């Protein structure tokens, strides 16, 4: 075969693929677009530049799905068109894609354009990229102007002063655009742009635009401006922020639209770090108090979820921090614990325990414990669950003794909660409680509960209860197992409910790893062997599986005398599944000896 | 085997009443009961002052107008309805006062004097303009769930009623009122269309319609803002409760457009109305939307091709209920289609219809087949049978043998019979060619697959 032949053969499928780009079936066009990089690779950089890219630019009127893939592919195309100096040939198709109606396509095109900008030389930026931004910014339809907003920050830094001035002017026009969608996009990008604009222009040009956006008639514009405010404040530093921005920010805390207030609450900790200690104490503490008492539940909920972070981030001496948390934040928090809205309460419950290390032992006992107790008894299961899952934080401050003394009654009550997720959370907390309370205390108060969970009607609880049992045995030792656990397991083996008998076998499997072999042989193995004649096939094959797992605890002699006869008889069982698992177990154990 | 045996032995643990695996509807029902009792209006009142009852307007002999203004000012006080027991007395005073105001502007002439307009508009603005609360139910399903009703409706209803009576009063002078009912006012009014309460949206619809009718200077602005709301709905939030109401107003606005249509209006059709078909909640406003589209086509038939191609572009791929709506709209469009326009779009259109008829969802297939109950449509098909029959035949022939639903098979069979009567020569040709075509098609598919395999190979190299 000659070289040209093989080259032709290699190009033939490419020709077909290009043909498929025009196929009637969307799926086929999509497949073909996905292989675009391979097509380009086969065509070579020259033909990709002169044929493929113009072809793609001309044929952009496809289904959004195809366009999306195209927009994504083009962002990675630089090596395929011959490197950075040719990056600009990719701009025309992406420019068209940045003007289409569908948001996901547009966003992807902008994302790709942003990637490409980095590969342009300063000269290419001015010759190709900036004109594209200018065209998009002056587009007739709002889609192109919206896309333009995201492109300023990636080209601004590396162009000449005159072009920079033009770019700022264009951006300023977009900030006052007629269409709210465009102003929204500008509000979302103004912070990003500020990061690359010279400080003097940030103050003289971008700040006025920002203030205007913060006072926009549409709340959807204002709320995006709040997001950008964080970046702007960080750039300006506390002193200038106080002088130039604080008025806008404070009006946002008090905005008539809950969406804007929500956004402030959501960005509160970021604002806190941008504003610095002094401004935070002067303004934000008060603002936070107001947000925690907002008339709108949505706002209260997001504020409540910031309680811990806000207090932790307070840059102040420990005494001062405790003072703020105790006197300014805690009163509002106490109100929230009794909020009418369960989302608010649950958001609070997920973070409130985190206040404990900040406040110290004394205040925790005095101020927080009553709060936890109220929340532990809350009618909403999610609130109870969030409190239980975070007991750890309090534990480390006041110690398990004190914690269990005050919370134990509530915990016992929750152990029988009607929501299984709550019961599950309690179970998972048991090993920790057990290891710190000691076996005597445990036997008195909690043992009963742990055994009760073994026969819960929700499988997830039974499963967790079995695992819990193993951890308890690991903590209290095998003697405790012998006296407390094994009798219970033996009891389950003869329960009338077959699901409970299954639990018995699960227990044996788990305990196997926690108990010494002689104990397994003496106490657990007989229980299992007896169950081989169970009436339910599921139990019988579980017996086979369990025996296989116990193999580590017995020797060849025990196997020959006790286990093998049992498995042999199961291998001849009437049920096909029992036969299967019995044979599998026999084989596995035989391999071992 | 074993599972069955297990079932026999034990019926499972006793069913707990508080079973966590309650079904979705049960949960929904309990949630709903809790939600309905809650208010939806969240003002931020600055501790309302207690109202004192003013004397009735009909008893005031001389300074009736002065009392009227006083009453308007009194009604600017807004109450918190989320708490049903607060300010009960003052709320009742305001309610009777509003009621009296409604009656007063309805029956008394000469009430609307230049100086009273600002007071009237201020009272209305104080009461109705507010930021709507977040939806209680983020995955609100308009067909399943009940909307959250506006808690302050006992007052709001009268305020809207009053507003309407003012707008409809023979004394009403737009030239004076336009100072107060301006762009800012209208913008706030439009935002209220997102209200979840259908009663409020209904009032808003009539109010906006009157404003559009009486304030010529605001018309272009209103259209542009509705545009923005729709675009935001389509491309950003997908959430706006009042789309149907706004479309209803637009339906009659479009009806009044002068010919030839301005570019602005055509752009609205292509860039806003057609993409609205993409919305997930299309079912909520499809009837109004289809009406608007058909209105446009009745005005200007040359838009037909753009509209049909637009709909084909957005044609639902997976949601059968939406596809049924699209088919319905397509039939309405065909009903007003001129034969010349029909010829321009029949090929892509009938390719889609062939696909819809082949849908395994029988309602989709059935809706498409109902086209053949429409005399005008069948006439168009018959006139162009040489083009349309070859498009439809392969699918119809296959369905007549393969579709699981007997009704569909019977309907398809009837259509095939009508094809036979229409053009028996072509029908025979198509029948004979069917097998060969199928084989060719299979071969094409196989070739493509082979090629892709080769391609993978190349890719690896």
Image (tube, coloured by chain):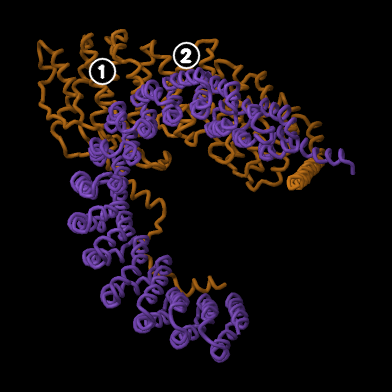
Q: Are marks 2 and 1 on the same chain?
A: yes
Relative vertical location of residue A142 with respect to residue A463 in this rendering, above or below:
above
Q: Colour of chain B?
A: orange
- Name the foreground residue: A311 vs B114: A311
Per the image, the residue denoted by label 2 is B256
Q: Can you give x and y, in whole percent of width and height, for residue A122 in the image?
A: 57, 25
Quarter of the rendering occupied by the C terminus of chain A? bottom right
Residue A36 placement: quadrant? top right
Q: Helix or strand or loop: what does disc 1 sit on?
A: helix
Say which residue appears at 20% left-offset and 20% top-offset.
Answer: B101
Instruction: Kindly report which numbered mark, 2 or 1, lies closer to the viewer in this rendering.
Output: 1
Residue occupied by mark 1: B121
Specify the quadrant that holds the N terminus of chain A: top right
Pointer 2 and pointer 1: residues touching (CB < 8 Å)? no
In x, y percent, where is residue A368?
A: 22, 55
- For the point 41% across and 42% down, the residue is B139
């Amino acid at each position: 075969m000659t070289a040209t032949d093989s080259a032709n053969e290699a190009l033939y499928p490419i020709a077909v693929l290009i043909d498929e780009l025009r196929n009637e079936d969307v799926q086929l066009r999509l497949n073909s677009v996905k292989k675009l990089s391979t097509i380009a690779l086969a065509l070579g950089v020259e033909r990709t530049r002169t044929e493929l890219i113009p072809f793609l630019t001309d044929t952009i009127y496809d289904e959004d799905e195809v366009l999306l893939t195209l927009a994504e592919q083009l962002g990675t195309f630089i090596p395929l068109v011959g490197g950075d100096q040719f990056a600009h040939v990719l701009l025309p198709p992406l420019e068209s894609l940045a003007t289409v109606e569908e948001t996901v396509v547009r966003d992807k095109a902008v994302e790709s354009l942003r990637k490409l900008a980095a590969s342009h030389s300063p000269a290419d930026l001015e010759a190709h990229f900036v004109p594209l931004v200018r065209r998009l910014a002056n587009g007739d339809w709002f889609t192109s102007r919206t896309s333009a907003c995201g492109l300023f920050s990636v080209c601004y830094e590396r162009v000449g002063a005159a072009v920079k001035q033009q770019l700022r002017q264009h951006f300023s026009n977009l900030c006052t655009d007629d269409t709210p969608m465009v102003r929204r996009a500008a509000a979302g990008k103004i912070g990003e742009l500020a990061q690359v604009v010279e400080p003097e222009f940030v103050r003289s040009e971008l700040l006025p635009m920002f203030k205007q956006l913060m006072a926009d008639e549409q709340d959807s514009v204002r709320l995006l401006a709040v997001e950008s405010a964080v970046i702007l404040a960080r750039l300006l530093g506390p002193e200038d922020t106080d002088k130039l921005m604080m008025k806008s920010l404070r009006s946002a805390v008090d905005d008539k639209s809950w969406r804007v207030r929500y956004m402030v609450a959501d960005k509160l900790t970021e604002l806190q770090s941008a504003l610095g200690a002094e401004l935070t104490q002067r303004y934000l503490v008060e603002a936070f108090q107001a947000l925690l008492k907002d008339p709108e539940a949505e706002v209260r909920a997001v504020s409540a979820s910031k309680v811990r972070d806000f207090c932790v981030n307070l840059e102040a001496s420990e005494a001062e921090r405790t003072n703020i948390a105790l006197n300014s934040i805690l009163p509002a928090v106490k109100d929230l614990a009794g909020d009418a809205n369960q989302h608010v309460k649950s958001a609070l419950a997920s973070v409130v325990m985190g206040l404990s290390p900040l406040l110290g032992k004394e205040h925790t006992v005095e101020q927080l414990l009553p709060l936890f107790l109220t929340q532990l008894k809350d009618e909403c299961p999610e609130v109870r669950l969030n409190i239980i899952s975070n007991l750890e934080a309090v534990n480390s401050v006041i110690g398990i003794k004190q914690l269990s003394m005050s919370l134990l009654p509530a915990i016992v009550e929750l152990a029988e909660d009607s929501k299984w997720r709550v019961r599950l959370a309690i179970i998972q907390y048991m090993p920790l409680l057990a290891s710190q309370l000691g076996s005597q205390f445990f036997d008195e108060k909690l043992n009963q509960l742990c055994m009760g969970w073994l026969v819960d009607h929700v499988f997830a609880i039974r499963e967790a209860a079995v695992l819990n049992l193993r951890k308890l045995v690991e903590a209290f030792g095998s003697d405790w197992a012998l006296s407390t656990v094994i009798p219970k397991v033996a009891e389950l083996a003869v329960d009338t409910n077959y699901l409970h008998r299954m639990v018995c076998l699960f227990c044996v499997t788990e305990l196997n790893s926690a108990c010494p072999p002689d104990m397994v042989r003496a106490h657990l193995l007989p229980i299992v062997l007896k169950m081989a004649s169970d009436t339910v096939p599921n139990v019988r094959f579980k017996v086979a599986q369990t025996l296989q797992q116990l193999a580590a605890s017995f020797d060849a002699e025990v196997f020959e005398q006790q286990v093998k006869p049992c498995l042999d008889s199961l291998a001849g069982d009437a049920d096909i599944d029992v036969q299967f698992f019995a044979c599998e177990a026999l084989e596995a154990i035989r391999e071992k000896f | 085997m074993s599972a069955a045996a297990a079932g026999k032995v034990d019926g499972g643990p006793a069913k707990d009443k508080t079973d966590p695996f309650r079904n979705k509807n049960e949960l929904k029902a309990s949630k709903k009961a809790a939600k309905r009792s809650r208010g939806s209006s969240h003002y931020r009142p600055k501790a309302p002052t207690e109202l004192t009852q003013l004397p009735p307007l009909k008893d005031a002999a001389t300074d009736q107008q002065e009392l009227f203004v006083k009453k308007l000012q009194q009604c600017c006080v807004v109450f918190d309805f989320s708490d049903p027991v607060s300010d009960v007395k003052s709320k009742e005073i305001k309610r009777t006062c509003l009621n009296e105001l409604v009656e007063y502007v309805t029956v008394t002439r000469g009430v609307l004097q230049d100086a009273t307009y600002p007071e009237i508009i201020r009272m209305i603005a104080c009461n109705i303009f507010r930021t709507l609360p977040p939806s209680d139910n983020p995955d609100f399903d308009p067909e399943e769930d009940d909307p959250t009703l506006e808690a302050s409706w006992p007052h709001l209803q009268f305020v809207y009623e009053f507003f309407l009576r003012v707008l409809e009063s023979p004394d009403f002078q737009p030239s004076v009122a336009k100072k107060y009912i301006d762009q800012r006012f209208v913008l706030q009014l439009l935002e209220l269309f997102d209200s979840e309460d259908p009663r409020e949206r209904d009032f808003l619809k009539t109010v906006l319609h009157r404003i559009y009718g009486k304030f010529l200077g605001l018309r272009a602005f209103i259209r542009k803002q509705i545009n923005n709301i729709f675009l935001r709905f389509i491309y950003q939030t997908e959430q706006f409760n009042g789309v149907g109401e706004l479309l209803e107003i637009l339906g009659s606005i479009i009806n009044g457009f002068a010919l030839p249509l301005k570019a602005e209006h055509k752009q609205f059709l292509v860039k806003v109305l057609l993409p609205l078909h993409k919305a997930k909640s299309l079912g909520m406003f499809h009837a109004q939307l289809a009406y608007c589209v058909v209105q446009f086509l009745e005005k200007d038939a040359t838009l037909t091709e753009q509209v049909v191609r637009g709909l084909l572009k957005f044609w639902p791929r997976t949601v059968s209920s939406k596809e049924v709506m699209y088919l319905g709209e397509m039939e309405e469009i065909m009903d007003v289609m001129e034969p010349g326009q029909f010829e321009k779009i029949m090929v892509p259109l009938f390719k889609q219809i062939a696909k819809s008829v082949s849908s395994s969802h029988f309602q989709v297939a059935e809706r498409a087949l109902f086209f053949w109950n429409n005399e005008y449509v069948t006439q168009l098909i018959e006139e162009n049978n040489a083009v349309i029959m070859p498009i439809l035949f392969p699918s119809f022939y296959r369905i007549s043998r393969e579709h699981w639903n007997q009704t569909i098979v019977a309907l398809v069979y009837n259509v095939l019979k009508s094809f036979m009567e229409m053009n028996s020569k072509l029908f025979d040709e198509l029948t004979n060619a069917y097998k060969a075509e199928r084989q060719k098609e299979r071969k094409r598919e196989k070739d493509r697959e082979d090629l892709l395999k080769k391609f993978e190979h190349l890719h690896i190299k």
